[in-house]
Image: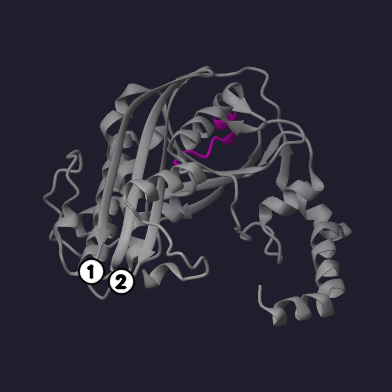
Amino acid sequence: MIKDVYELLLKNKDEIKNEIRLLYEKKDDNLNKKVLEKWTEYCPTEFKFSTFLAIDGGLWTKELRYGFVYIVDAEIVKAEGYNTTPIDSKAYIGVIRPGNLAKERVSLLMQLLELKLALKHGNEADYILFDGSITKKIGKYKLSSKISLLDDIDPLSDKIYSLEEQDEELMYKYLIAENHLVISELVNRYKNKLIWVSKNSKSIELFKEGISDISILEMFTRNCGYTKPLQKQISGENIISTKASQTLDQQTYYSSYIRLKEGEKVLKVDSFTNNVEEIMNILTPINIKGYPYPLLKVHTDVKVSKEDRQRIEQLLNIKKRDIEWWPNQLF
């Protein structure tokens, strides 16, 4: 790290440490009162044993002088209790040249693989679990006009139509539209099965403080429980596909914070039902340290580890020059 950074750190460390401490010790009575008003203690005693599909994706990217190398994968597992079985997976590998909007396109491609797996197998379990949030999956995109070119594609097809486009900016837009089309088909077919679980939400919509809602709830509560679901609507302005907007525009969904096990992390859940106690009843029997085990299992399967990255670089003969400090982009 450059010398100037360390000098600034040494000069301001006490102030920074104090700011961090205040974030953890912001326990004023007014905020505590707000939390107590919004938090309902609830520990399920009558579990609802169900079957689940859990989906997640992983990616690896490498920016080089001659392009942007990527690998994406996605897997879907079926869970009955703590017994999980992988039932399908998808993977893509390629090079993007010259590499504009490369990271954004790779991320959208990974998400599209996840969504297609969910759509293909959605009828094989009672509920479908995703990592993240509905808002993040849809994104906040606004174009002057919507895209109808992909409206006639088969969302169940294994083919990724957007990848056939050579223009980088158009491919990016088509990937967004293709994602929206598959999401709309998921909602049409499996609306009441869909549950999104976020463990790292930075949202401040509940308490409107300078700290995330999850952090505040973890400061003031320990028991299992939940917050009253917030009713939200999907904005058609963010839906790029003309066909998808017909299904998703003004679609109502609900967000709530839950804790499945005393003393463990608070999670944010999105679904199309406002019955948060029922969601807790079905997730509690499959939780490990307060998190749904099927999502943990599939995340472990698709994650690209450090060893994986090193092996991939060796297989592709991507390695640093003899000079260790030489930037990756220059070879």
> CA gap, disc 2 to disc 1?
7 Å
**What's the coloring here?**
one colour
Residue contact at pointers 2 and 1, CB within 8 angstroms = yes
**Residue at the image position 84 percent from the left and 60 percent from the top:** 26
Left or right placement of residue 92 versus residue 331 in this view: left
Left or right placement of residue 258 versus residue 115 in this view: right
The amino acid type of the residue labelled 1 equals Glu
Element assignment for label 2: loop
The amino acid type of the residue labelled 2 equals Asn
Q: Would you name the residue on which mark 1 appears?
A: 168
Mark 2 Cα within 10 Å, few/some/many (few <14, many 20+)? some
Asked if residue 188 can be seen in this view, the reply is yes
Residue toward you, 206 or 141: 141
Q: Would you name the residue on which mark 2 appears?
A: 100
Please report the bounds of the magenta region as a residue range: 271-280
Left or right placement of residue 57 versus residue 204 in this view: left
